[in-house]
Amino acid sequence: MKPDPRPQTAPPTEANTPKNFHHYLPITETLFDGGVFVTSVGAGSVDAGAHYPLPGHPSLYHFNWREGRTLPEFSLMLITEGTGLFESRSTGAVSVAAGAVIMICPGVWHRYRPEPTTGWTEKWMHFNGELAHRLLAQGVFSLRQPVWRPNDFKLVEAALNRLLLVVQRRPAENSLQVSLLGLALLSAALAEDATVAGPASESPSPTGQTPSLTDPLVQRSIDHIWTQGHKELAVADVAAAIGVNRRKLERHFRATLGRGVLDEIINCRYSRAERLVRETDLPLKSIVGLAGFGGMENMRRVFIARAGHSPAAHRQSLRTG
């Protein structure tokens, strides 16, 4: 019998999961109704003595050790090799070792880093949604004990690998499948909480899903927009990054999605700005830059068109409504 010439898809394992990559996924309003939706995933291997954090992240997610960071969403990180340190205002400094899960909640100042003598390998998911906030309100996620070691962290890693591989194969799409894999990861991480670490010394399809993207130009463009969306991107910048002229890219976008490249850029900006307005107390001037808007008036016009009122009024309505 002749061997099957078709390429075989290997099962998700660490062996075929990339060591260094990250993707920031497009977010549509239909995902908000699913309980939990994934906003980004990634993996990184940091050698001993190497600079940390790894470069290339949007400014909303990038940080330095001195200033730390506050996120508008949840983050789950698994350390698979090495050791390091996590710190928040409620925990102080906490030692982190291989096999540890770190859960970061919205609005919580924090910072973390590998030990210079060991480095570490990290895999992570950022997520949000009503169910995630309910779990926080019910005490499933603890602000005071955000670092723990599951009995079998390999089960957590396997769930993370499945999510990472699905996103790697289709980085420009967010879907119910991605959300379900995110839920499976949360279940694996929370099911066997063994040891808590101590102090250290817009345009939905009829089914409500993101349309299946078969056009590689559109896939690469959306991936670029959502990964580089903290910059003041123009349509010409996206076309140049993909290596095609603007007119060709616009044709492909409209044929595939029924909207233009600028619409996707604005979707990305508004999604990130709205989450920052909703989940943090950051000044609006800071949000303008973090979301990639060129100025306050630009952000204000988009909010009025999308939310019906200004960013300030939107924040007020969320907190008094």
Image (cartoon, rainbow, N blue to C red):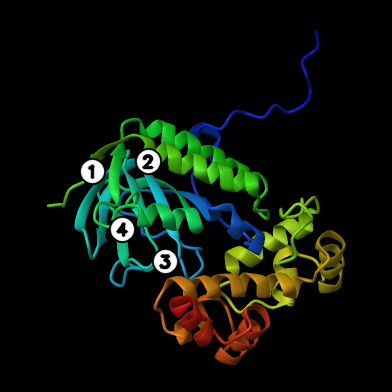
Which amino acid does the dot numbered 3 rest on? Answer: Leu
Q: Mark 2 = which residue?
A: 190
* 3D distance between C-alphas at marks 1 and 4: 17 Å
Helix, strand, or loop for circle 2? helix
Q: Which residue is mark 3?
A: 71
Question: Could you tell me which residue is drawn at 35 percent across and 30 percent down?
Answer: 152
Q: Which residue is mark 4?
A: 112
The answer to which of marks 1 and 3 sits earlier in the sequence is 3
**Residue 59's x, y, as percent?**
48, 71
Q: Are marks 4 and 2 in contact (CB under 8 Å)?
A: no
What's the amino acid at mark 4? Tyr
Please rate how many residues cluster around mark 1, counting C-alpha atoms within 10 Å: few if below 14, some from 14 to 19, many from 20: some
Left or right relative to 248: residue 176: left
Q: Element at badge 4?
A: strand
Q: The residue under label 1 is which amino acid type?
A: Val
- Per the model, the C-alpha gap separating discs 3 and 2 is 21 Å
Is residue 198 visible to us here? yes
Q: Amino acid at mark 2?
A: Leu
In 3D space, how far apart are the residues under numbered discs 4 and 2 (Cα atoms)? 21 Å
* Of callouts 3 and 2, the N-terminal one: 3
Closer to the camera, 67 or 321?
321
Q: Which residue is mark 1?
A: 196
Quarter location, residue 302? bottom right
How far apart are the alpha carbons under marks 4 and 3? Answer: 13 Å
Give the mark nearer the N terminus: 1 vs 4: 4
Which one is in front in this view, the residue at disc 3 or the one at disc 2?
2
Instruction: Indicate the position of residue 143 as horizontal and vertical percent values.
Output: 28, 57
| Picture residue at 34% right of the left edge, 48% below the top | 140
Badge 2 crowding class, 10 Å Cα cut-off, few under 14, some 14 to 19, many 20 or more, is: some
